[in-house]
Amino acid sequence: MAGNTEESKNRLSESTTQSSDIPVCEILCVHTDLIESVRKTLIPGGQAHHLADLFKTLGDPTRVRIMDALAKNEFCVCDLAELLGLSQSATSHQLRVLRSDNLVKYRREGKMVYYSLDDDHVMALYREGLEHISEGRKETY
Amino acid sequence: MAGNTEESKNRLSESTTQSSDIPVCEILCVHTDLIESVRKTLIPGGQAHHLADLFKTLGDPTRVRIMDALAKNEFCVCDLAELLGLSQSATSHQLRVLRSDNLVKYRREGKMVYYSLDDDHVMALYREGLEHISEGRKETY
DNA sequence: TATACATATGAACATATAATCATACGTGAG
DNA sequence: CTCACGTATGATTATATGTTCATATGTATA
C-alpha cells in the first residue's frame, strides 16, 4: 500500500517561483512542495496509457460477458456466440481485443478454436471488479 | 459501446435442443448441453453493463494518472491539475466520472475540495491492473 | 483438387466520449 | 450586499470504438 506519505500538511509552500503559466490557482491553492514530491513517484505516461488500455478492454459489456463465460469454462467462438447471443463476427472481433491485452488465450483443435482466460491473475482482476460493484449501491440497471 | 443492441438478441433461448435461428454453427460445433448449463450461471446483463462501466471509467490515461496520484496522497482539484498538466475543467470533469463509480471520495475545506481514493478496495483493483501490465510483455509505448 | 465449415478481418456506419470554452455555483473576505 | 477564487457543469467538436456486412484464411474431408 503506497499509503499516505507524511508531509501531507505543508500548506503555504514558499513558492516565490510559482509556475505562472498555469492559468488557474495562481498561487494560493497549489501545494508546491507536495506536488513536486509526488510528481517523482507518478506512473510514467506510457505506462498509464498501457494500463488504461487494459481497463478499457474490460470496459465493454460484451467483453465482460465473454470474460464471465470464460471464467466458468473454455469455449469455442461458435459456442460463445450462441451462449451470448452475438454474431460470429462480433464475437471474433471482441476476442481479438481481449487477446491483444493478454486477457485470453486460445488453442486450436481441428477447425475450432477454444478460448480461455489467460491465467489466474486475469481472474483475480475480474473478480476485484465484481466485488467493487457488489459493494457499491449504484443504481441498478 | 456503439451498436450494442439493447438486451442483445435472444437471451434465454427457449429450446433445450437447438436454437435454429442462429445462422452460424448449425449443429456441429455447438456444445448444447454445456452452453445451457453455463448459461444459468452467467452474469446478468445489467450487472455486466455495470461492471463494464467501472472498468471503462478506469480505461482512460488521464483518469489512470489521477488514480495514481490519489493512490499516493489526497489532492485538491487545483493541485491535480497542476500535477498532471491538465486544465481545471478537464480535471473536474474526470473527477466527476471517477465519483460516479465510487472510485474517489472528497471532502470540502473552505473553497477547496480534496479528493482521495474511496477505499482500500479501489486501491487493490488498481494494483491488480498494474500487476497485469507488468507481467505481460506487450510492446512499450 | 474441390467443398464445407469455423474463424478472422477490412471497411463503413453510428454511437460514445474526452478536451475545450464559457459560464454557473459555492464559499469566505471585506 | 459585492467581490474573488476554487470548483462544477452544459454545449460543442474531434476522435475513438463496437457492430454489421462482405470476404478472406485455415482446416478437414471427399
Image: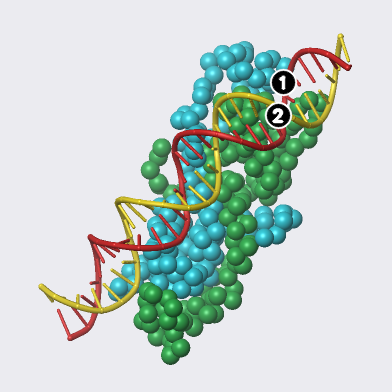
Chain colours: A green, B cyan, C red, D yellow
Q: Residue at x 40, y 47 (%)?
A: A137
Amino acid beneath label 1 = Cys
Taking the image as shown, residue A22 lies to the left or right of residue A67, namely left
Residue on which disc 2 sits = A76
Taking the image as shown, residue A93 lies to the left or right of residue C27, namely right
Answer yes or no: is residue B14 visible: yes
Residue on which disc 1 sits = B29
Q: Is residue A55 above or below residue D8?
A: above
Proximity of marks 1 and 2: CB atoms separated by less than 8 Å:
yes
Disc 2 residue crowd, few under 14, some 14–19, many 20+, Cα 10 Å: many
Indicate the secondary structure of the residue bearing disc 1.
loop
- Residue B73 in the image: state x and y as whole percent: 49, 72
Tally of marks:
2
Q: Residue at x 43, y 49 (%)?
A: A136
- Residue B8 in the image: state x and y as whole percent: 50, 28
Q: Quadrant of the C terminus of chain A?
A: top left
Q: Residue at x 55, y 59 (%)?
A: B61
Q: Nearer the viewer, residue C9 or D18?
A: C9
Q: Quadrant of the N terminus of chain A?
A: bottom right
Q: Chain of mark 1?
A: B
Q: Residue at x 69, y 43 (%)?
A: A99
